[in-house]
Amino acid sequence: MNRAAPVRLSELVATLSLVADLGMGRPMERVLRQTVIALRLADAAGADDSVRAAAYYTSLLTWVGCAADTSELAALFGDETELYADSHDGDLAGVAMAMFVLRHLGRGAPRLRRAALVGRFLATAGRSVQQVMQAHCQSASELAGRLDLGEDVCRPLLQSFERWDGRGVPGDAGGADLDPAIRLVQLADNVEAFHDTAGVDGAVTVARERRGTQFDPALVDCFLNHCGDILAGLDRIQAWDEVIALDPRLGVQLSDDELDRALQAFADFADLKSPPRLGHSRGVAALAADGATKLGLPAPDVRLVRRAGWVHDIGMIGVPSAIWNETRPWSLAQAERARTHPYLTERMLAGMPGLAAVARCAAQHHERLDGSGYPHGLSGDALPMTSRVLSAADVYHALGEPRPHRAPLAPDAAARTLTAEARAGRLDPDAVSAVLTAAGQRVRRTPDGLTARETEVLLHLARGLSNPEIAAALTVSRKTVSTHLEHIYAKLGVTTRTQAALVAMRRGLTG
């Protein structure tokens, strides 16, 4: 795959901040604006370059764990996005935190289940909620490690829910023990949220009210003294461009191997959204790449398919976990919400020109040849073979995995379903054949070795259709038809259309 431009580390991490916005139901580019505030505050406070760099990446990653690893949160609170929407409203510590949790526990659940959740929370002094919060911090810190961001970023991420007064979660640090980067980020986070809803006055008020409790008092004083400069033009800036320009690593570009490792981290993070899907994205990527190789696609296309497989479900993070974990048939509203995830995948990756082709391919994994797919209803030649292989691999791999509403299918049953989708005109037969072969499934062939698609081409050929007409009938390109004909002639030992037609008639295909 020839990338249009190199991919920078700052772009990848900034993309993850968009994922966090999406998964928490917050306005797009919210974390980017928070990062601008954190860097301006760092400059006003005279922070050295190492603290400034740590604050940059810590800010972009602070909420990623909360956005992805939400299955347990959804089990406790229902729609996690509603919980996050309320989380800035008060100074949450001690009794205030307990009351906040009790108001949200079991929201939307039957009365008996809600009562059970509240009782367990009170009996364990909120241990289950604390464990979820700590797990989110650990997830973000681990991701930073996989992106080679170093201990200066991994350490403050573990303190995301700590407080200056020591009353945070897990309550192991406070005051001067809090990493300088997380102090900057915590204040910037709240300042951005209140500035968005109540302007400069709101931002100043929340900083002043929580001085010495949630926030470092010296840092609050610095903000109050420089709030005009720190908040200047915040509602008018191009947040993405400004954050990329602030990159403390000066536009470090990723090698192919580094990019692959980062996209694998994206894959694992996307799968955290629903426990039954763990390993799905890696599995789809491997199967799709093997299928593309079986088809004889060039190496750049194989690499594109593999990378698209790693990130194809990143948009799932933008859909509440309760939908993915639903054990009953989806309502119309739930189905429509779930169907947005390929579009969200494309939207999340749109800021990286170097991954434009990967983003397009990933976003098309639910499109279908007959136009019945989503999100754009593409069909026929609008879907390149790379996208067709990814679609087939995604369906086959998903069928073999458990889901909350069904048990996994056996490999033979999954293969039959995939083949039926090809016969119905929704999946590409060549892509299906290649994926099944890659998965170790036997693919039916004629005595002459023709695949199911080649047999279809032969039938149309025998009926007198031209190459363009065959291409239109099968919704493939003319080049693909020509390739099929070359294979047919070679396998049948013929050199002309007439000879091939005679073979078709002998087989009774024209009856």
Image (cartoon, helix red, strand yellow):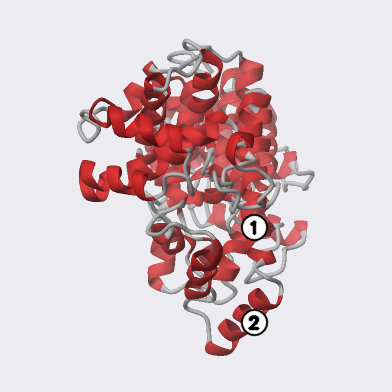
Say which amino acid is labelled 1: Val
Callout in the foreground (2, 1): 2
Quadrant in the picture for residue 38: top left
Q: What number is the disc on residue 119?
A: 2
Give the camera-side residue of 205 and 250. 205
Quadrant including the N terminus: top right
Q: Looking at the image, which residue is at 55% across and 29% down?
A: 180
Is any atom of residue 84 visible in this view? Answer: yes
Q: Which residue occupies the extreme bottom position in the image?
A: 112
Q: How crowded is mark 2: few (under 14 residues within 10 Å), some or many (20 or more)?
A: some
Say which amino acid is labelled 2: Gly
Q: Looking at the image, which residue is at 46% across and 24% down?
A: 11
Could you tell me residue 279's position as x and y percent? 70, 46
Could you tell me residue 268's position as x and y percent? 65, 42
Quadrant in the picture for residue 403: bottom right
Give the camera-side residue of 179 and 317. 179
The answer for how far apart the CA atoms under marks 2 and 1 are is: 17 Å
Q: What number is the disc on residue 331?
A: none
Q: Looking at the image, which residue is at 51% across and 14% down?
A: 49
Could you tell me residue 480's position as x and y percent? 49, 29
Is any atom of residue 476 visible in this view? Answer: no
Q: What number is the disc on residue 132?
A: 1
Could you tell me residue 100's position as x and y percent? 48, 68
Is residue 103 found left or right of 447 in the rendered image?
A: left
Give the camera-side residue of 271 and 504. 271
Above or below for 387 versus 417: above
Badge 2 marks a residue whose secondary structure is: helix
Is residue 410 found left or right of 45 in the rendered image?
A: right
